[in-house]
Structure formats: C-alpha cells, structure tokens
Image: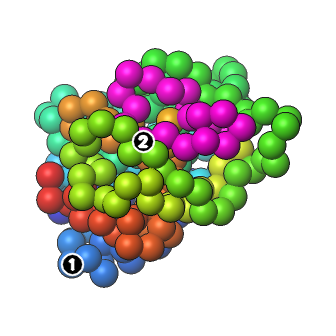
Amino acid sequence: MIAIVDYQAGNLASVRKAFDYLGYESVISCDPAVIAGASKVVLPGVGNFEATTALSGALREAIVKVIDRQVPLLGICLGMQWMFQASQEAPKLRGLGLFTGECERFPAAVKSPHVGWNQLGVRGDSRLLRGLPQDPFVYFTHSYRAPLVHETVGDCAYGGSFSAAVERGPVFGVQFHPEKSGEAGLHLLRNFSEL
C-alpha cells in the first residue's frame, strides 16, 4: 500500500488519481500508524514552507521510521524541499535534513513563481528517473528552489541550475509535479511504485 501523507498542504487528489490510473493501491492518510506501516510513502506538498509545521511530532516520527526501515519515500515539490535542512521562506523552521543546504527564492532576474513546463536534465544513474527520455519536459510550480547537492539526479535551469530531482537510498524527491507531468510523470510514478 502506498500512503500519501495528508498534512493539509498537498495536491492529494491528483497524486492519488495518478496512482489509480497506473493500477497501484494508495491511501490518503494523516494517521502516523498507517504511514509508518506503508510499503511506500509519498509526501506531496503545495504552498509555503510554513505548512511543514504540521509535519512535526507523530507525523515526523512516522516518516523517520519509514526511512529507518528503508521504505521508499517520495517527496513532491514542498515535500522535497522539507527533506533539505531549511528554507529561506520560513527561516525559523527546520526541514528533515536528509539533504544538505537551504532552499532559496529565485533571483529577481527571473519571474517567480516558476510555473509551467521546463526541461529536466537527467544526471547520471537514477532508479527514479530510469527509462525517461533525455531531458523530458515536466511541470513546475514553485517560488523557492533546492540547491544542487551530491545526490542531485535531475536538474533544471531557471535563473541558474537547481535540484529538480534528488535520490539517496530509499529517499527520493522531485521539485516538479509528476502527477501533472504527462507521460514522463506517470513513468516516474511507475518507477517509484515498482521499487
């Protein structure tokens, strides 16, 4: 069972609809026991980094248990940003710290938010991005971006390069929305579901 974490900040219905379309069973839940016991976990997210305040206490503990059990975890958009140490969008809050660095606002030289289709530069070997065509177009909508890190497996160029996909062990994150990214996004969700 794929658990989609409901912390009141996600694009939950679209994510579940994508898994339904692909034929994978999923459940939307805010119950830490359901999340901790899932075979895979998706942490979606839309909006301000402040929304991750809800990912504290029992929900955070459930997500940490999932990671400790080596259960595949996929962060989408804000969910991926929360996997980093922090964000300039809410400087007093801390992220989960799975990846080093702080998410920052796009430079003033480019329009923000970054909304629409852009190319994903696939970098190196990735279980999540396996089988995608070279430099596929995917759908973004965000005002803050994650830095390039050692675990970056996909980048995007918009006001400079940023991490569009990260991967370390069972932990994966994408800045774009695979549930809104057509065939490329469905392919990615299928890869995740079959891990």
Q: Residue at x 17, y 49 (%)?
A: 37
Q: Nearer the viewer, residue 47 or 126?
A: 126
Q: Specify whether residue 86 is in view.
A: no
Mark 2 element type:
strand
Inspect the image, locate mark 1, and give the three-letter code of the amino acid beneath it.
Gly
Would residue 141 be found to the left or right of residue 32 on screen? right
Instruction: Please tell me which of labels 1 and 2 falls first in the chain.
Output: 1
In the rendered image of this protein, does residue 153 appear above or below residue 128? Answer: above
Residue 194: image location, x then y, percent: 15, 59
Q: Residue at x 34, y 69 (%)?
A: 186
Inspect the image, locate mark 2, and give the three-letter code of the amino acid beneath it.
Gly
Q: Which quarter of the figure is the N terminus placed in? A: bottom left
Other-residue count near label 2 (Cα within 10 Å), few / some / many at <14 / 14–19 / ≥20? many
Would residue 77 be found to the left or right of residue 109 on screen? left
Q: How many marks?
A: 2
Q: Nearer the viewer, residue 91 or 164?
A: 164
Which region of the structure is painted magenta? 144-162
Magenta stretch encompasses residue 157: yes
**Colour scheme of the rendered structure:** rainbow
Kindly identify which numbered label has been placed on residue 154.
2
Which of labels 1 and 2 is toward the front? 2
In the rendered image of this protein, does residue 25 appear above or below residue 104? Answer: below
Residue 145: image location, x then y, percent: 62, 36
Q: Residue furthest front?
A: 134
Mark 1 highlights which residue?
23
